[in-house]
Image (cartoon, rainbow, N blue to C red):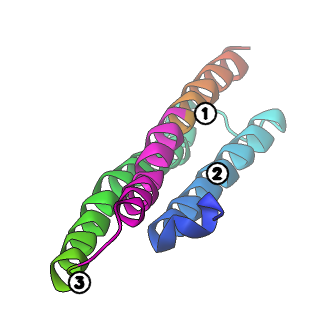
């Protein structure tokens, strides 16, 4: 099973926030290269959107496995004879948004730090 389709709806929400964060980062790089941003205070809110998207990716990554495992526990209680392979597959799938949340936050943090560095180096010139 493909890990993207197995990740469920929470992984798609994480992908949406990843797309928004990268879009804002590209926007800021374009504005900085055209010198349309003149002060750090002008660019700070848009840079913070990148970091906010990373925090949302991380938060969803923490909440999604809890919801998935709670639903899995409810299904196990209803069905009495479940194979251990199915349970282990369910646990693996439930951790996909968690792992992506860690990586997404780390990537957003790197993007945010890169934007701050680029912004400060361009504005000082």
Q: Residue at x 66, y 33 (%)?
A: 38
Label 3 Cα crowd, 10 Å radius (few <14 / some 14-19 / many 20+): few
Label 1 Cα crowd, 10 Å radius (few <14 / some 14-19 / many 20+): many
Q: In x, y percent, where is residue 17?
A: 54, 59
Q: Earlier in the sequence, mark 2 or mark 3?
A: 2
Q: Earlier in the sequence, mark 1 or mark 2?
A: 2
Q: In x, y percent, where is residue 124?
A: 66, 15
Q: Quadrant of the C terminus?
A: top right
CB under 8 Å between discs 2 and 3: no
Looking at the rendering, the stretch of residues picked out in magenta corresponds to 81-106
Residue 17 colored in magenta in the image: no
Distance of label 1 from label 2 (alpha carbons): 10 Å
| The one of 94 and 39 positioned closer to us in this rendering | 94
Q: Which residue is mark 2?
A: 24
Between label 3 and label 1, give the one nearer the viewer: 3
Between label 2 and label 3, give the one nearer the viewer: 3
Between label 1 and label 2, give the one nearer the viewer: 1
Q: Which residue is mark 1?
A: 111
Q: Is residue 48 above or below residue 76?
A: above
């Amino acid at each position: 099973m493909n890990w993207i389709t197995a990740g469920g709806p929470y992984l798609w929400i994480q992908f949406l926030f990843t797309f928004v964060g990268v879009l804002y980062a590209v926007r800021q790089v374009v504005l900085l290269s055209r010198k349309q941003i003149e002060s750090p205070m002008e660019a700070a809110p848009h840079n913070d959107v990148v970091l906010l998207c990373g925090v949302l990716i991380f938060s969803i990554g923490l909440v999604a496995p809890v919801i998935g495992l709670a639903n899995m526990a409810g299904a196990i209680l209803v069905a009495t004879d479940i194979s251990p392979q199915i349970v282990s597959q369910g646990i693996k799938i439930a951790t996909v948004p968690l792992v992506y949340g860690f990586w997404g936050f780390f990537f957003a943090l790197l993007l945010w730090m890169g934007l701050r560095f680029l912004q400060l180096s361009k504005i000082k010139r």
